Amino acid sequence: MYAGREGEARALFPAGTSSQTIEQSFLAVYADLGNWTKVASILKGLIAADPNNMELRMNLVAAYFQGGNKTAAISALREMIAVNPTFKETGERYIKEIQAAP
């Protein structure tokens, strides 16, 4: 993966390994590489499979923010609030922090 050979890395997983497991394995590598677009893409796929997973959603917010996309980070936080209204107070605080960030 660090050498940019994703296809070869995928081939190393045993047959029958779920795509979700493979994608989760790649998250740390792409984060280490600073490829926040790829991290966000993987997280969106994982969220599609588990839409109520707030940890995945918060990781998506972080990926957008790390990648400099404050608008997408705020949008993802608003989606989190819609999915889990008990997150509203915390989510709104995070939105304000992101808006205030340089």
Image (cartoon, grey):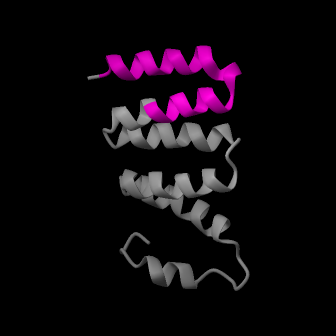
Q: Main secondary structure of the magenta part?
A: helix
Q: Looking at the image, how many numbered discs can be counted on the residues?
A: 0
What range is drawn magenta here?
Answer: 75-101
Percent from the top left, x then y, of residue 17? 70, 76
Residue 24 lies in what quarter of the image? bottom right
Specify whether residue 17 is painted magenta. Answer: no
Residue located 47% across and 38% down the image: 62
Residue 50 position (above or below residue 96):
below
Percent from the top left, x then y, of residue 96? 42, 15
The one of 96 and 85 positioned closer to us in this rendering:
85
Percent from the top left, x then y, of residue 71? 35, 33
The one of 78 and 46 positioned closer to us in this rendering:
78
Percent from the top left, x then y, of residue 32? 42, 54
Q: Quick one: quadrant of the N terminus? A: bottom left
Residue with the most extreme front position: 82
Residue located 57% across and 58% down the image: 45
Residue 56 position (above or below residue 71):
below
Residue with the most extreme right position: 16
Residue located 53% across and 64% down the image: 26
Residue 75 position (above or below residue 38):
above
Residue located 37% across and 40% down the image: 66
86 sits to left or right of 10: right
46 sits to left or right of 27: right
Specify whether residue 84 is painted magenta. Answer: yes
Q: Quick one: quadrant of the C terminus? A: top left
